C-alpha cells in the first residue's frame, strides 16, 4: 500500500483527535446493520457508505443505480433496462447470457439474498442502503468477493404509521406508493407497502412508433414482527416484484433513435419469503435461526441486428436491402429458485458470533436464438454449505482485535441440451483480521487484512460451439477451458474515521491494496456475427487506491456531503481467445477517479435547496477489448418544502443533459461498412426532471 496514503490518513486522525474534551455521547451516530452486529459506521473496521431514506428522497432515486454514483469507487453497467450489474473497486460482473455465473457483489434485501438479481433493488419505503467495499468473505461468503450491498425496508412499529408518495416527470414518467403499519396486541406489529413506477424510457423506436425501452415496475413488501414470549421473537418478511421493462438500447449509429423491428424485454417476476426466529433465553448466547425462499422468473431478450426488415421503408431499414444484412433475435428465460437456512449463535455482549449456513440455488434456462437449430435448455443446480465465526478480543481499553474465519463448500452440477455435462466442486476459505484503535471517543484508526473468494464455474456456451464441427476455429482453446477455477482476493486496508470536537465534521478515509489471485475475467470470441462468451483465469490482478467520504456542517443552514474515490488496477497474464494480450492493462469498469459533492442549503426551517455534481474518469468497458467510456461530469439539483407531515420536491438529474454511457461493446454489426469492428454504446440516463409529493406520519 502506498505509504503516502497511510501518512495522509494518520494526519487526518491527528487533526480529528485534537480537542479531546468532546463527549462521546454527544456524537451523532449513523448505524449500519448489514454486518454481524449493528454499530456506528464510524466504528466499523471496513470501508462502507450509507444512504438514508432522506438521502434517497433528496435525489429522487427510485432504483439502486440512481444512487450508486454517490459512493466512492462504485460503478455499474446496464446491458439491460436498468444498471443491474455492480462493480466495487473495479471488480464485478457486467452481464449474463448463456452460462451460469457467480456474483462478485452481493445484494441482500431484508435478509433475503438477491445476489445476481439486481432488478429487485427498488427503493420505495427503504430505510437505508449500505455498501460495503472489499471482500466480505467472513460475513457473506462466495457472493461477496468485491463487496456487499445491504438494503433494509422500513420496520413495523407499534404506533400507527402511513407513508404516501406521488410523483411525475418528463418522458411520461409517474410513480405512486403507499406504506402503512400498526401494532396489534401488545407485542406485535406489521407494515405493508406497494409501489408502482412507469416511464416511456429514453429510446424512441421510429419504425414501430413506440417506446420500446419503457419502464413498468411494481413491488410489494410486508413485514410482521412479534414478541411471542419474553425471550422469543419472530420476524416474517415477504416480497413480490413484477418488472416488465422493454429493452431496445443499441443502434448502429449510436443514438437514442431505434429502428429495431423486434425489440426485447427485461422482466422479472419474483416472490420471496424470509423468517427469522431469535431466542435470547440462554445465559451464554442468543440463538437465531433464519429461513428464506425465493422464486424468480426472468426474461432477457433483444433484437440482435438492431434494425428492421421492411423493403417498403428503405429510409429506415437495412435488412433485406443490403446483400450482407441479417435478421435475428436472442431470448433468455430463466427460472431461479433459492433456499437458505442459517443457524447463528452470538455472545450476549456482542463480542463473538458463530454460525452454520446452507444455500441451494437451482436455475433452469430456455434460450431461443435464431441461429440455433432448436431451443437450447440448461440446468444448473448448486449447493453451498459454510461454517463461520468471528470474535472481538480487547487488547487494551482503546485497542480491539477482530478475527474471523469462514469455510465454504460449493458444489455445482450443470447439464444442457447440447450434451454438455460438467460439475464444479470447490472448498474455499475466507478470513478477516482487523486491529482497531480508538484514539479518542470520536476518532478510530483501523488496519485490516481480509480474504474473499468466488467459486469457479463452467463455460458451457464455448464448449457447445467447440463441439459443433466446423463452427468454431478455436475448438482446442474452448475445450481446454471447459471450466474455470475459483478466484481469491486478498485485501489490506488502513483507515481513519472520526468527528470533529464541535460535531460539524464527520470524515472516513480508507487506503486499500487488493491482490486478485487466479483472477476471473470475462471475454468474447466473435465469429461470423456469432458470439461466444467465456470466463478464463488470468494470473493475477492488483487494485489499490483511496476512498474519502464525509459530511460537514458549514453553518446552521448549509451542509456539505461528498465522496472521492481513487483507483488503480492492473491485469497480469491474460490473453483472450482472439489473441489479445491484456497484461498490464487496467481492469474493466475501474475509473481512476470518481467523485460526488452535494450542498444542501436550508432557506427556512421548511424550504431547502440541494445542488450536486458528480463525475468519473474514463474506463474500459470490457476485458476483451479496449473501447472506453469517456470521462463525464453531471449536475443534479432539487428544491423542496418539507412541513411536519407533508412535503413537495422539484428535482432534476443530469441537468445539463450530458451524454454518457453505461455499457459498451466492440464488434462488427453493420453490413453497410462490411461489419468492421467498432464501438457500440448504450446511453445512460439523459436529463430527467419532475416533482414528487409525500405525506407521512
Image (cartoon, rainbow, N blue to C red):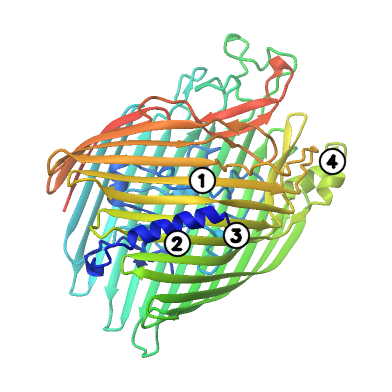
Which secondary structure lies at badge 3?
A: strand
Residue 249 in sight from this viewpoint: no
Disc 2 from disc 3: Cα separation: 16 Å
Give the number of the mark in front: 4 or 2: 4
> Of the numbered discs in the image, which one, if any, rests on residue 566?
1
Q: Residue at x 45, y 62 (%)?
A: 112
Question: In the picture, which quadrant includes the C terminus?
Answer: bottom left
Disc 1 from disc 2: Cα separation: 32 Å
Q: Quadrant of residue 328?
A: top right
Disc 4 from disc 2: Cα separation: 41 Å
Q: Residue at x 40, y 89 (%)?
A: 284
- Decide which of tag 1 and tag 3 comes sooner along the chain: 3
Give the number of the mark in front: 4 or 3: 4
Q: Are marks 2 and 3 in contact (CB under 8 Å)?
A: no
Q: Residues within 10 Å of mark 3 (few under 14, many from 20)?
A: some
- Left or right: residue 433 versus residue 614 is right
Give the number of the mark in front: 1 or 3: 1
Q: Are marks 1 and 3 in contact (CB under 8 Å)?
A: no
Which secondary structure lies at badge 4?
A: loop
Of the pair 695 and 270, the residue shown nearer to us: 695
> Of the numbered discs in the image, which one, if any, rests on residue 474?
4
> Of the numbered discs in the image, which one, if any, rests on residue 112?
2
- Decide which of tag 4 and tag 1 comes sooner along the chain: 4
In this picture, is 19 found above or below 574?
Answer: below
Q: Residues within 10 Å of mark 4 (few under 14, many from 20)?
A: some
Provide the residue designation for mark 3: 362
- Decide which of tag 4 and tag 3 comes sooner along the chain: 3
In this picture, is 264 found above or below 673?
Answer: below
Amino acid at each position: 500500500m502506498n505509504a503516502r496514503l497511510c501518512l495522509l490518513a494518520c494526519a487526518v486522525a491527528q487533526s480529528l483527535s485534537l480537542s479531546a474534551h468532546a463527549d462521546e455521547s454527544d456524537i451523532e451516530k449513523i448505524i449500519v446493520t448489514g454486518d454481524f452486529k449493528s454499530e456506528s459506521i464510524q466504528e466499523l473496521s471496513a470501508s462502507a457508505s450509507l444512504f438514508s431514506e432522506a438521502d434517497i428522497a433528496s435525489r429522487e432515486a427510485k432504483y439502486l443505480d440512481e444512487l450508486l454514483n454517490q459512493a466512492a469507487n462504485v460503478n455499474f453497467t446496464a446491458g439491460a433496462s436498468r444498471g443491474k450489474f455492480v462493480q466495487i473497486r473495479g471488480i464485478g460482473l457486467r452481464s449474463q447470457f448463456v452460462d451460469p455465473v457467480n456474483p462478485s457483489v452481493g445484494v441482500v434485501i431484508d435478509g433475503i439474498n438477491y445476489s445476481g438479481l439486481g432488478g429487485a433493488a427498488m427503493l420505495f419505503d427503504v430505510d437505508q442502503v449500505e455498501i460495503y467495499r472489499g471482500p466480505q468473505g467472513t460475513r457473506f461468503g462466495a457472493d461477496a468477493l468485491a463487496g456487499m450491498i445491504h438494503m433494509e425496508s422500513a420496520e413495523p412499529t407499534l404506533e400507527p404509521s402511513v407513508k404516501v408518495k406521488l410523483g411525475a416527470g418528463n418522458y411520461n414518467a409517474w410513480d405512486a406508493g403507499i406504506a402503512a403499519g400498526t401494532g396489534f396486541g401488545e407485542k406485535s406489529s406489521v407494515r405493508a407497502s406497494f409501489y408502482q413506477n412507469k416511464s416511456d424510457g429514453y429510446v424512441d423506436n421510429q419504425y414501430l412508433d413506440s417506446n420500446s425501452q419503457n419502464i413498468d415496475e411494481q413491488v410489494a413488501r410486508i413485514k410482521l414482527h412479534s414478541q411471542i414470549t419474553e425471550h422469543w421473537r419472530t420476524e416474517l418478511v415477504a416480497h413480490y416484484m413484477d418488472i416488465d421493462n422493454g429493452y431496445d438500447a443499441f443502434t448502429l449509429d449510436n443514438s437514442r433513435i431505434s429502428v429495431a423491428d423486434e425489440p426485447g424485454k427485461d422482466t422479472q417476476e419474483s416472490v420471496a419469503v424470509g423468517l427469522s426466529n431469535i431466542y435470547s433465553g440462554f445465559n451464554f448466547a442468543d440463538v437465531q435461526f433464519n429461513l428464506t425462499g425465493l422464486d424468480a422468473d426472468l426474461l432477457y431478450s433483444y433484437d440482435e441486428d438492431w434494425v428492421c426488415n421492411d423493403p417498403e421503408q428503405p429510409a429506415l431499414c437495412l435488412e433485406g436491402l443490403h446483400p450482407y444484412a441479417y435478421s435475428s433475435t436472442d431470448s433468455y428465460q430463466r427460472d431461479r429458485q433459492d433456499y437458505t437456512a442459517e443457524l447463528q449463535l452470538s455472545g450476549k455482549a456482542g463480542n463473538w458470533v458463530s454460525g452454520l449456513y446452507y444455500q441451494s440455488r437451482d436455475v433452469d434456462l430456455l434460450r431461443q436464438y435464431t441461429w440455433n437449430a432448436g431451443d437450447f435448455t440448461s440446468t444448473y443446480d448448486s449447493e453451498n454449505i459454510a461454517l463461520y465465526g468471528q470474535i472481538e478480543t480487547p487488547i487494551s481499553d482503546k485497542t480491539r482485535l477482530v478475527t474471523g474465519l469462514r469455510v465454504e463448500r460449493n458444489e455445482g452440477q450443470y447439464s444442457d441440451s447440447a450434451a454438455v455435462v460438467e460439475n464444479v466442486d470447490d472448498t474455499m476459505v475466507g478470513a478477516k483480521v482487523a486491529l482497531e484503535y480508538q484514539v479518542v471517543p470520536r476518532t478510530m484508526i483501523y488496519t485490516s487484512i481480509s480474504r474473499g473468494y468466488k467459486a469457479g464455474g463452467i463455460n458451457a456456451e464455448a464448449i457447445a460451439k467447440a463441439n459443433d464441427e466446423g463452427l468454431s476455429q478455436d475448438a482446442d482453446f474452448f475445450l481446454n477451458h471447459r471450466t474455470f477455477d475459483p478466484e481469491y482476493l486478498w485485501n489490506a486496508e488502513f483507515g481513519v474515521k472520526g468527528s470533529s470536537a464541535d460535531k460539524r465534521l464527520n470524515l472516513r478515509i480508507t487506503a486499500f491494496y487488493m491482490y486478485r489471485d487466479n483472477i476471473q475475467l470475462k471475454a468474447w470470441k466473435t465469429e461470423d456475427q456469432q458470439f461466444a462468451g467465456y470466463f478464463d483465469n488470468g494470473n493475477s490482478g492488483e487494485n489499490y487506491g483511496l476512498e474519502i467520504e464525509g459530511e460537514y456542517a458549514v453553518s446552521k443552514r448549509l451542509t456539505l456531503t461528498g465522496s472521492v474515490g481513487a483507483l488503480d488496477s492492473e491485469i497480469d497474464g491474460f490473453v483472450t481467445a482472439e489473441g489479445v494480450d491484456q497484461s498490464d492493462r487496467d481492469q474493466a469498469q475501474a475509473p481512476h477517479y470518481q467523485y460526488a459533492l452535494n450542498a444542501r442549503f436550508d432557506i427556512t426551517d421548511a424550504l431547502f435547496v440541494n445542488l450536486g455534481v458528480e463525475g468519473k474518469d474514463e474506463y474500459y468497458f470490457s476485458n476483451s477489448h479496449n473501447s472506453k467510456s469517456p470521462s463525464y461530469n453531471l449536475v443534479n439539483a432539487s428544491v423542496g418544502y418539507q412541513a411536519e407531515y407533508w412535503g413537495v420536491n422539484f428535482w432534476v438529474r443530469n441537468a445539463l443533459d450530458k451524454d454518457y454511457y453505461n455499457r459498451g461493446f466492440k464488434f462488427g454489426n453493420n453490413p453497410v461498412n462490411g461489419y468492421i469492428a467498432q464501438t457500440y454504446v448504450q446511453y445512460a440516463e439523459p436529463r430527467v426532471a419532475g416533482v414528487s409529493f409525500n405525506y407521512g406520519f
